[in-house]
Image: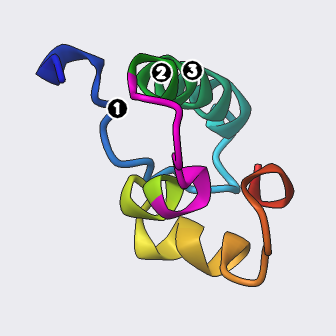
Amino acid sequence: MDRFLKPERLDVDPSSPTSSEQWKHWLATFENFLAALPQENLDKKSLLVNFVSPRIYSSIAASRTYEDAI
């Protein structure tokens, strides 16, 4: 895996005025990363958890699927 496709860990303050733009950009980089991985048995939610900060994780922890978390 090309290290340049790996997204940085998402750690944005949800109350920041730029949080929406930061989220959209991060999500685009994360989805590019997912697209570059072998798709068979790909656990998107587990990968998502690995690339978000504890602050963001607390918002998605109860989500059952990747789609719900997003």
The span from disc 1 to disc 3 (Cα, nearest Å) is 10 Å
Residues shaded magenta: 37-46
Q: Is residue 61 left or right of residue 8?
A: right
Relative height, residue 3 to residue 19 (above, below): above
How are the colours assigned in the image? rainbow
The reply to whether callout 2 and callout 3 are in contact (CB within 8 Å) is yes
Name the element at disc 2.
Answer: helix
Q: Amino acid at mark 1?
A: Pro
Q: Is residue 15 left or right of residue 47?
A: right
Q: Position of residue 52 (x, y in %)?
A: 45, 58
- Camera-side mark, 2 or 3: 2
Tell me what residue is drawn at x 76 percent, y 84 percent.
62
Crowding at dot 1, Cα within 10 Å, few <14 / some 14-19 / many 20+, comes out as some
- Residue under label 3, please give it: 25
Crowding at dot 2, Cα within 10 Å, few <14 / some 14-19 / many 20+, comes out as some
Q: Amino acid at mark 3?
A: His
Q: Position of residue 5 (x, y in %)?
A: 29, 18
- Residue under label 1, please give it: 7
Q: What is the chief secondary structure element of the magenta stretch?
A: loop
Q: Position of residue 20 (x, y in %)?
A: 73, 33
The mark nearer the N terminus, 1 or 3, is 1
Reply yes or no: does residue 20 show up in magenta: no
Circle on res. 29: 2
